[in-house]
Amino acid sequence: MRPVIHILVIVFWVLSASQAICDVYSWTDENGIRHFSNVSSPYGKKATQIPESVSSVIDKSNFLVTKVFDGDTVQVQGRELEFRIRMVAIDAPETGGSKKNGQPYSQRAKEALTQLIQGKKVRLKQYGTGGYNRVLAEIFSQDVNINLVMVRRGLAEVYRGRLPESLDFGSYEKAEAAARRRRAGMWSLGKAYKSPKTWRKENPR
C-alpha cells in the first residue's frame, strides 16, 4: 500500500494544470532526496515512471523551506518528499560556490531570501523540471509571490532564457523595470553590473 501512496504523491506533485503533460521520472538519490526529470533517470538509478495519460492537478499543499542555497534555489520538505526548487523566471547573482568569489549582491540575495522564507511553510506553483532535476516553481508565502519580491528588491533579474508559456511574464518585466529605475540592490552597480548568465559563461564550473 505504501508504494501506491508514494506514486500518488509524486503524481500530485510533478504535474500542473497550466502546462502540457509529459512522461516524468522520479527517483531518490543516496542522500534520500527525491528528484524529478522529464527525460529519464540517471544510469543505475531505479525510477518510477509517471505516464502521460495521468490527469494533471494543481498542488496546493504547504511545504517547509529547510534550506536556502542562494538567491533563487531552495530546498523544501513535506508530503514525505524533500527536493530542491529552482525559482522560476528569476536569476539571482551567483555566489560562486566554495572555490570562487561570487558576484556582488549574491550574499545579500541569499540573506534576503533566507529571511523571507527559511523555516517557513510555503505554497508552490510548479512549471515542470529544470536543470539538475530541480522543480521549477513560483514560491508563495502568505499569498505573496517571493519570486517577484526578489526582482522588486533588485536582488534578481528576470531569467534570460526560455520561460514557461503559462507564466505571467509581464509582471516580472514590470518588477525589473521598476527596480532598475530605483537603482535598487544590484542595479545600483550601474555599468559595472553583470548578468548572472554572463557571469556563468565567464566562470564555468
Image: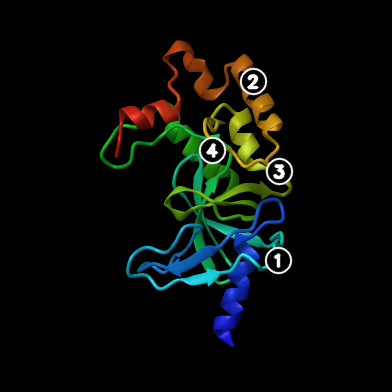
Residue 204 drawn above or below residue 17: above
The label nearer to you, 1 versus 4, is 1
* Label 3 or label 4, whichever comes before in sequence order: 4
- Quick one: quadrant of the C terminus? top left
Q: Count residues near mark 3 (Cα–Cα under 10 Å), then give few for <14, some for 14-19, many for 20+.
A: few
Question: The residue under label 2 is which amino acid type?
Answer: Ala
Residue 186 drawn above or below residue 145: above
Q: CA distance from mark 3 to mark 1?
A: 28 Å
Residue 2 drawn above or below residue 91: below
* SS assignment at label 4: helix
* SS assignment at label 3: strand
Q: CA distance from mark 2 to mark 4?
A: 20 Å
- Quick one: quadrant of the N terminus? bottom right
The residue tagged 1 is 55
The label nearer to you, 2 versus 1, is 1
The residue tagged 4 is 112
The label nearer to you, 3 versus 4, is 3
* SS assignment at label 2: helix
The outermost residue toward the front is 53
Residue at (49% x, 67% y) in the render: 26
* Label 1 or label 4, whichever comes before in sequence order: 1
Question: In the shown orientation, is residue 26 left or right of residue 5?
Answer: left
The label nearer to you, 3 versus 1, is 1
Residue at (37% x, 63% y) in the render: 42
Q: CA distance from mark 3 to mark 4?
A: 15 Å
Q: Count residues near mark 1 (Cα–Cα under 10 Å), then give few for <14, some for 14-19, many for 20+.
A: few
Residue 144, numbered circle: 3
* SS assignment at label 1: loop
Residue 97 sits in quarter = top left
Of residue 29 and residue 114, the one placed in the foreground of this image is 29
